[in-house]
Amino acid sequence: MERKKITPVDIQEMKRAGKKITMLTAYDYPMALLEDRAGIDIILVGDSVGMVVLGYENTIPVTMDEMIHHTRAVARATKRALVVGDMPYFSFHLSAEETVRNASRFLKEGGAAAVKIEGASRKRLKLVEAMVEAEIPVMGHVGLTPQSIHHLGRYRVKGTGAEEARRIVDDAANLEKAGAFAVVLESMPVEVAASVTRTLKIPTIGIGAGPACDGQVLVFHDMAGFSVGYLPKFVKKYADLHGVMSGAVGAYAKDVREGRFPDNTTSYHLKPDAAAEFATKREGEPKGRAKK
Ligand code: KIV
């Protein structure tokens, strides 16, 4: 397998060459190591970390410091994949200056090579331009933007009506014009995602957006069956990690309770000649606490 680090330019080249782009989220060292070794092209340190790892109800509470902490762990494990850091809620809402400063932390402190930002309002597009101007590769994100949860009321499929569908097409095109190197299309009809993918020169990465996208992304915990509770319709579960790991934890607890662990094979012993000396010294030890 090729070990050269993948760049945003390589990702764009994959679209031109008709090669599907693989992207998954990761939040820590072992997860990133296995995804990188499996040949995943882009590892997204998503703000979904807030929900699947940190136990928040949604992604709103996730902070820059939490994102940097997880991005550093992922970057340390990654030799080949492009690492993208997800700009958390309110890290890009006040000014272009603060946005660029926060985005630069992903590169300087986190070891990522790009950032992702949700939304494509006129103000958001200016922020994308400002980050690109600061040499920070930016991935856009349109359709369902989970950071808009309080505005939306609930997570829902976007663009099922003609007007909202047209807005998604325009938003994606505007992100391309603003300099984004790729765009995530989340929770939308396949027809809308196909139209965006045909129209744009930059690659589209779908999540719940059908097969026409240039690439696909899923949250690792969802696709590996590690998440508990509700899963959106678009998730395909490739394993039952929760079941496997629950089984392991249960078997460990049973072994400890019933005296089967640790056993001889998982225990250390004195060297043979030290055993006799240790036993003798022990016998001669004064009872109680030794005086100084
Ligand atoms: O935070 C995340 O994991 C994401 C993906 C779902 C695209 O934004």
Image (spheres, grey):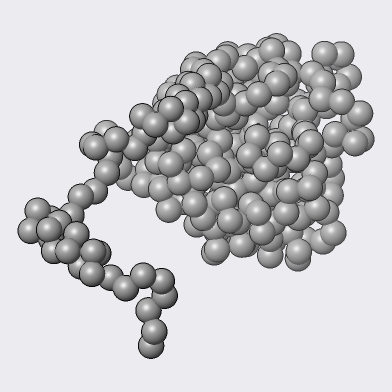
Give percent across and percent down for residue 133.
64, 59
Tell me the quarter of the picture where residue 40 sits: top left
Left or right of 198, for residue 141: right
Give percent across and percent down for residue 188.
74, 18
From what the image shows, is residue 213 above or below residue 137? above
> For this rendering, which residue is in front, 276 or 113?
276
Q: Residue at x 43, y 27 (%)?
A: 258
Tell me the quarter of the picture where residue 109 sits: bottom right
> For this rendering, which residue is in front, 195 or 82?
82
Left or right of 61, for residue 219: left
Note whether residue 71 is visible.
Answer: yes
Q: Quadrant of the C terminus?
A: bottom left
- Numbered-mark total: 0
Q: Residue at x 82, y 25 (%)?
A: 155
Q: Residue at x 78, y 37 (%)?
A: 58
Q: Residue at x 28, y 70 (%)?
A: 285
Give percent across and percent down for residue 46.
63, 40
From what the image shows, is residue 236 above or below residue 74? above
The single residue placed furthest to the bottom in the displayed view is 292
Note whether residue 175 is visible.
Answer: no
> For this rendering, which residue is in front, 57 or 5?
57
Left or right of 213, for residue 161: right
Q: Quadrant of the N terminus?
A: top left
Give percent across and percent down for residue 288.
41, 71
> For this rendering, which residue is in front, 79 or 265?
265
The single residue placed furthest to the left in the displayed view is 273
